[in-house]
Structure formats: structure tokens, C-alpha cells
Amino acid sequence: MGSCYQWQNRIHAVLKELKHQRDLSRHMGYRVPRSKLNSIDYLLIALTVLLILRLSIHLVTFTLSARMGFNHPCSCFLPECMIFSMNYLLFAILAEITRCWWRLQSGLKMVLLDRHSSTVASKLWEIKRLHTRFQRLIDLTAEVCSIFRYVTLAYMARLLWSGIVAGYLLVRFVIGNGLLDVELVYLVFSFITCIQPLMLSLLVNSMTSTTGSLVEVTRDILKIPHKKSAKVERSIEWLSLQLTWQHTHVTIFGIFRINRSLAFRSASFILVHVLYMVQSDYISITK
């Protein structure tokens, strides 16, 4: 129980800090570009629809399993509700961190491109403040990875398991002969249940890839030349140097980065195990 309260307090602290960052950016006039904001909103809408669909399918599966008289091991409605809340919470926090980064990037562009109306002292102060806020968001990203490390580990394990089972059931459904009605319904329910985490992984991977590239994009912005002041130029170079050794990658226990490279390795892992299962069970599938 104590660990649960500690976990809640850490999440509450992250949300409170993100709200402070958002309010401060709005006060300073930093805005997220409309195109980027729409992309995040579309991902959140797609995630909401997918997770609601998952809960609906599990509820229908549970009801039909009870009426048809067979126990479907994938019909676990209450755990799915917990998975729903944790996945959405993690996704929403990463989306807000990304928005905060985009606001700071717009503020950084304003400072670098405004070469006449601001004094050197004010620009140095603004760059220093942006540096502090960038560092705070980097620390928040690491904190989120630490808080949700077991959630992301379970997500990874569930993704691999679902991919292997869905691939095997698809092969069994295509080349299988003489399936009973109950067995056929079981295969369909299992496939529908297992394909959902694979669909969710596409959305999560898109979000984490965007979050992981924030530092690289910021370093590109810092390459904008500023020759009017040597002090400002040195301050920009110092900020770029500090960001060189930092990252915003979403990791699992600091080992695996959730990105497109991990998606490719996971797909290869799933394919190899599906082929192994089909090879081992080929006789029983085709007879």
C-alpha cells in the first residue's frame, strides 16, 4: 500500500510540474505550432477509441464465453481496465512533455531570431531560463520512465506474447482443417484479443519516437547563427553542448528504447517464434 501511495505521489508531482511548465510558457507567449498540436490530438483520439474498443471487445468476449459454456483465458475484463488506465496515463504524460518541449522550442526560436528589440542581457537571461526548463523536462522524462518502468516492461512482454499468439492463431485458422465450432470461436476471440496490443504499439511507438527526437530537434534549432553578440553566441554554444549528452528517450529499465528500432527487433522475434510454433505443431494443425 505504501508503494502505491508513493507511486501516486510521484505521478502527481510530475503532473503538477507539467502544469507549471504549461502555464509559464503561455504567460511568456510560447505557442505550439498548430500542425504539431493536431498530430498529438489525433494520436490521443485514436488511442482513446482503440482502448475503448478493447474494453468493449473484452466485455463482449466475457459475456459470450459465459453463455457458450467455455472458459476463455483471454477474457479478463478487470485487468484490461487497469491496462487501459495505465496506458492512457503514460501516453498522456508523454504527450504533455512533448507539448512543453515544442513550446520551449518556439520560445528558443523567438530568442534567436529577435536580433534588434532585445538587449544582450535580456537574451542571456532568457537563454539561461530556457536551459533550466529544458533540463527540467529532461529530468521529468527520466522520472516518468522510472515510474512506469514495470508498466513498460509488462507492455513489452504483452506485445511479444500477443504477437506470437496472434501469428500462430492466424496460421492455424488459414491452414487448419476440420475445426469445431467452439474451437473456431475460441480462435477468433483469441486473435481479436491479441491483435489489439499490436495496434496499440503503433500509436505508442509513434509517440515515443516523437518524444525521443526532441533533443535532436532542439540542437538543430540552436544551429541558427547569431553573430550580433559574442556573449549570446557562447551561451547558445554552451546550451548546445549541454544537450549533446542528454536525451529524452523512453526506455525500459534504461536498457531498451521504445522506438522504431525496437519495433523491428520485436517483429523479428515474433516471426521467428511463430515459425517455430507452427513447425513444432504442424501435424496437429493440418490433420
Image (cartoon, rainbow, N blue to C red):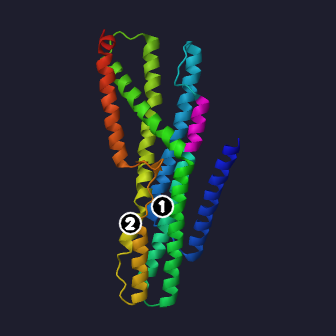
Q: Secondary structure at mark 1?
A: helix
Report x, y in % for residue 30: 52, 73
Q: Is residue 48 visible?
A: no
Q: Residue at x 33, y 28 (%)?
A: 273
Cα separation between marks 2 and 1: 16 Å
Q: Residue at x 46, y 50 (%)?
A: 254
Q: Is residue 256 visible?
A: yes
Q: How many marks?
A: 2
Q: Secondary structure at mark 2?
A: helix
The amino acid at mark 2 is Val
Dominant secondary-structure state across the stretch colored magenta: helix
Where does the N terminus fall, quadrant-wise? top right
Q: Residue at x 42, y 68 (%)?
A: 243
- Residue labelled with disc 2: 217
User: How packed is label 1: few (under 14 Cα within 10 Å), some, or many (20 or more)?
Assistant: some
Left or right: 261 as drawn, with respect to 43: left
- Residue labelled with disc 1: 37
Query: For residue 156, which quarter of the picture?
Result: top left
Above/below status of 99 relative to 192:
below
Above/below status of 42 relative to 121:
above
Report x, y in % for residue 94: 51, 54
Q: Residue at x 59, y 29 (%)?
A: 77
Where does the C terminus fall, quadrant-wise? top left
**N-term-proximal mark, 2 vs 1:** 1
Please say whether residue 5 is one of the residues in the magenta stretch. Answer: no
User: How packed is label 2: few (under 14 Cα within 10 Å), some, or many (20 or more)?
Assistant: few
The amino acid at mark 1 is Leu
Query: For residue 242, which quarter of the picture?
Result: bottom left
Please say whether residue 80 is one of the residues in the magenta stretch. Answer: yes
Report x, y in % for residue 196: 46, 35
What segment carries the magenta color?
A: 77-86
